Image (tube, rainbow, N blue to C red):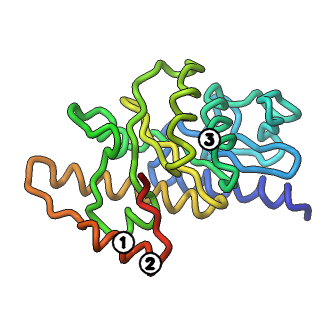
């Protein structure tokens, strides 16, 4: 089996897992992965729980379709992330409930939507900037993503949901799951005084695990 075929199959497996656990309701969310000769993306209006490996969209680095179904209308946000993060091999974009709920809160710190409340959030996600609201499919969003993606592996789209990149599909999925769980914790703690990790504790995570909290 070719590397591309294996990647297609893994996207299907991950999509099904995310859907079954309620992290991508209906036809929401999309998954992409980098190839040597382009990149794969889930097609438009597709349910992540019912993906077909042969129908996944394959695009070039200009965003043009090479083969497969019509790509998600949000293809440009993936492309903007890849262009600024050559180290990223995959991206997961979800409309998961808790992270989407956090994205709707007023008064978030746009430089860091979720404080460092657990070491796992620091290690797997890092500092999470807030991207201003744009209507779905508005390509002006790409420029905003490009401004943050070079320094941050994950972003939160206002009134929308998270965009999470990783070295590969599994690491992107795990980071997206960690973000959703931390969003749940943040909402459970909302209105209470939170004890966050301090700078020295964050530094220790960097020295021990290579965690990058971000600037």
Name the residue carrying label 2: 207
Circle 1/circle 2 CB separation < 8 Å:
yes
Does the rendering let one see residue 19? no
Q: Which mark is residue 81?
A: 3
Q: Residue at x 69, y 40 (%)?
A: 83
- Earlier along the polypeptide chain: callout 3 or callout 1? 3
Residues 57 and 63: in front is: 63
Q: Residue at x 38, y 62 (%)?
A: 121
Q: Residue at x 42, y 44 (%)?
A: 96
Name the residue carrying label 1: 203
In the rendered structure, the answer to whether residue 168 lies left or right of residue 67 reads left
Circle 3/circle 1 CB separation < 8 Å:
no
Residues 56 and 38: in front is: 38
Instruction: Check the image and report above or below for 8 versus 207.
Output: above
Does the rendering let one see residue 145? yes
Residue 100 locus on image (x, y percent): 36, 39
Q: Residue at x 91, y 61 (%)?
A: 2
Determine the CA span between mark 2 and mark 3.
Answer: 26 Å
Local crowd size for mark 2, using a 10 Å CA cut-off: few (<14), some (14–19), many (≥20): few
Quadrant in the rendering for residue 161: top left
- Earlier along the polypeptide chain: callout 2 or callout 3? 3
Local crowd size for mark 1, using a 10 Å CA cut-off: few (<14), some (14–19), many (≥20): some
Residue 194 locus on image (x, y percent): 14, 58
Instruction: Check the image and report above or below for 202 versus 64.
Output: below
In the rendered structure, the answer to whether residue 64 lies left or right of residue 135 reads right
Residues 116 and 47: in front is: 116
Which residue in the rendered view is the most extreme toward the bottom? 208
């Amino acid at each position: 089996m070719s590397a591309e075929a294996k990647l297609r199959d893994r996207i299907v497996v991950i999509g099904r897992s995310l859907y079954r656990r309620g992290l991508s309701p209906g036809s929401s969310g999309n998954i992409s992965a980098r190839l040597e000769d382009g990149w794969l993306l889930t097609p438009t209006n597709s349910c992540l729980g019912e993906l077909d490996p042969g129908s996944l969209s394959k695009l070039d680095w200009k965003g043009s379709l090479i083969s497969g179904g019509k790509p998600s209308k949000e293809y440009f946000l993936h492309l903007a992330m890849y262009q600024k993060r050559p180290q990223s091999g995959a991206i997961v974009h979800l409309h998961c409930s808790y992270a989407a709920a956090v994205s709707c809160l007023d008064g978030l710190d746009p430089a860091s939507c979720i404080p460092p409340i657990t070491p796992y959030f620091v290690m797997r996600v890092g500092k999470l900037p807030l991207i201003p609201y744009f209507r779905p499919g508005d390509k002006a969003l790409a420029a905003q993503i490009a401004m943050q993606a070079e320094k941050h592996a994950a972003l939160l789209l206002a009134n929308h949901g998270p965009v999470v990149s990783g070295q590969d599909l599994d690491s992107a999925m795990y980071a997206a799951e960690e973000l959703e769980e931390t969003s749940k914790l943040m909402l459970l703690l909302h209105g209470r005084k939170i004890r966050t990790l301090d700078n020295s504790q964050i530094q220790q995570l960097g020295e021990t695990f290579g965690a990058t909290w971000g600037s």
